[in-house]
Amino acid sequence: MPNPDRDYLTLSLKQYWFAPPVALWRAIELRTLATETYPRPILDLGCGDGLIAEVLFAGEPPFSIEAGFDPWWSQVRHAPATDAYRFVQQAQGDAMPYPDDSFATVFSNSVLEHIPHLMPVLEEAARVLRPGGRFIASVPSDAFRRLLAGYRDRVEVGDFNGAQAYANRIDRRLEHYRYPTPKRWAEMLGRVGMRLHHTRYYIPTDVEMLWDRANARYGIYAGRWHWYRLLASPRLQRLGYQGWLRRWIVRRLSQRWRAAYEKEVPTDGVGGGLLVVGEKE
């Protein structure tokens, strides 16, 4: 099972050195997800390339998760190489290729915010869950937009229209469709036969602001000609310097971002991420 004491920051930087802000956000998600229990068998909803499952469930031979699926073949074709799954396949979230009551846990990391029509996917998640099974998802929270550095900087000088426009640009760039409140999550889960067990905010305000500014610094928001994206481009791998660059990024940022990685959202506060845990009734 996941271990909340693992150094997910260093592990994520090793995986995502080419996009360091992604590593920071993923690391905090993983540390948060690792506090939960995951009864088997487990389904990874939107497994992508399998890197998240490989890090979160590391060290559990012969495989970490019973099944994973993703609609994008360009991603899911890499997942078997991680040895994290017993079975991996390409499938749609609103038509999961599994019998009723197949899994004790349906797990999803940073996926649901990218799905235009979410309710059919939640209905399928509830269908394949066993009674009493757990639904565990990490998503951007209802506070995500207003915690962005670009949003807050504009609000501070009274540019409210500019703040909204900035947040809209980030939504388009990241392909985010929604930010439900915990109350709204309870309503949606209730409609498909699940009850909301608990939610938990993560990624405090100053950490999301750091993340937002780092996205600009490392070219996540920019075109492909940004200096760091050029240095990290797979096309330049043959030049031989990227191993050094990867080690330098991991060593430097695992120290510089350590306090941000370990920081918790204050009691009764909000954060940029939201952990959602439901249970099939």
Image: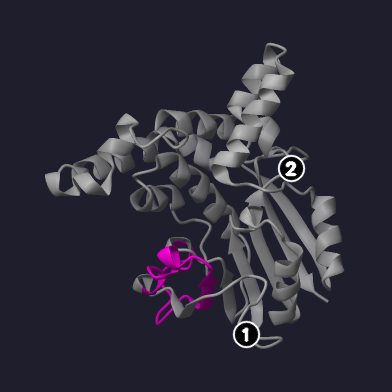
- 67 up-or-down from 93: above or below: below
Residue 24 lies left or right of residue 104; in this view the side is: left
Residue 85 locus on image (x, y percent) = 45, 77
Q: Which residues are magenta?
A: 53-80
Q: Residue at x 60, y 83 (%)?
A: 97
Residue shown at 63% from the left, 70% from the top: 93
In the rendered image, which residue does mark 1 sit on?
Answer: 98
Q: Residues within 10 Å of mark 1 (few under 14, many from 20)?
A: some
What residue is pinned by disc 2? 142
Mark 1 vs 2, N-terminal side: 1
Residue 252 locus on image (x, y percent): 32, 35
Q: CA distance from mark 1 to mark 2?
A: 31 Å
- How crowded pointer 2 is (Cα within 10 Å; few <14, some 14-19, many 20+) is rated as many
Residue 5 visible here: yes
For the residue marked with disc 2, what is the amino acid?
Asp
Colouring of the image: one colour
Residue in front for this viewpoint, 266 or 154: 154
Give the answer, above or below, for where 97 lies relative to 193.
below
Foreground label between 1 and 2: 1
What is the three-letter code of the residue carrying label 1?
Tyr
Residue 263 visible: no
